[in-house]
Amino acid sequence: MRNANEGPLGNAGDLAHCYERLLDQQEGGMSRAESETTAARTRSQPVEESVAPPPLRRILEALLFVGGAPLTAARAAESVRGLTAEQFREVLDGLNREYRQQGRPYRIQVREQGCELVLQPRFRGVLDRLYGSTREARLSPAALDVLSLVAYRQPIAKQEVEALRGAESGSALRQLVRLGLIAVQRGESEQREVMYSTTPRFLTLFQLRSLDDLPRTQDLQKL
């Protein structure tokens, strides 16, 4: 039973417990080396190219949907070769017009740090009812498992998380991104996968001064 003084998200000790349990499961079935080899093979598998590349507006929309840090024209240009700041603004303006015409519940918000895909004000209550506010959020066992892997192995790719858990983890990763506990790190333009790492908000909510304050586990000396 949790101490009454612990926050609803749990504490860093919960993360250490989940992390060690996942590693114990690995040792009981697939070995650590085998799981990492599987993850490496998954990452190295060629990605099938579509017959025709998607239009520019859909590529930028996908980059916004991934989440993480606000998207800037310079960051988008790392994925779209030759993209100019003017083209970036024009496409985002067009997407916002499209969203308004279609009555979409979201829009692209332009901030000083970049652009984000956000819910329209009248729909923000839906997010709180679904996930709870940040203060009230309670992580599911699956989300806590995923968060423990990100915390101890960051930066980590989705394929490696799934190889270590032995289960699909996309929905849990998206939830953690929405709650601001983890963020997406977009790599260089030639890097196909994205990596996940914890955020300053993660440290605050789990009452950690830095990642060095995470509870020690038997596996840390091997990482």
Image (tube, helix red, strand yellow):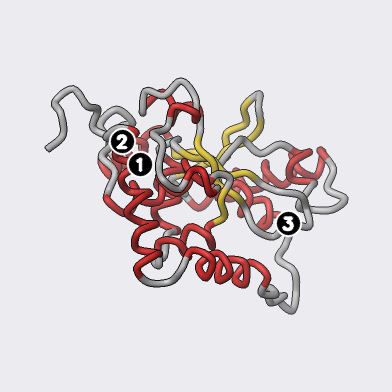
Asked whether 85 or 100 is in front, the reply is: 85
* Residue at (54, 66) in percent of width and height: 33
Q: Amino acid at mark 3?
A: Gln
Q: Check disc 2 and give the amino acid type.
A: Gly
Callout 2: few (<14), some (14-19), or many (20+) C-alpha neighbours within 10 Å?
Answer: some
Question: Quadrant of the rendered structure where residue 207 is?
Answer: top left
**In x, y percent, where is residue 11?**
30, 32
Q: Residue at x 60, y 46 (%)?
A: 64
Look at the numbered discs 1 and 2 and tell me whether their residues touch, using CB distance below 8 Å: yes
Residue 98 against residue 53 in the figure, above or below = above
Q: Amino acid at mark 1?
A: Ala
Residue that label 1 marks: 16
Residue 160 percent across, percent down from the top left:
53, 60
Q: Quote the CA–CA distance across marks 3 and 1.
A: 30 Å
Q: Residues within 10 Å of mark 3 (few under 14, many from 20)?
A: few
Residue 162: x %, y % from top left:
46, 63
Residue situated in front as seen by the camera: 188 or 124: 188
- What residue sits right under mark 3 in the picture? 191
- SS assignment at label 2: helix
Q: Secondary structure at mark 1?
A: helix
* Lower position in the chain sequence, tag 3 or tag 1: 1
Q: Position of residue 37 (x, y in %)?
A: 58, 69
Q: Are marks 3 and 2 in contact (CB under 8 Å)?
A: no
Q: Distance from label 3 to label 2 (Cα)?
A: 34 Å
Q: Is residue 168 left or right of residue 7?
A: right
Query: For the residue carrying disc 1, how many other residues have a C-alpha within 10 Å: few (<14), some (14-19), or many (20+)?
Result: many
Image quadrant assignment for residue 139: top left
Question: Which residue is at a point 52% across and 58% down the rendered structure image?
Answer: 158
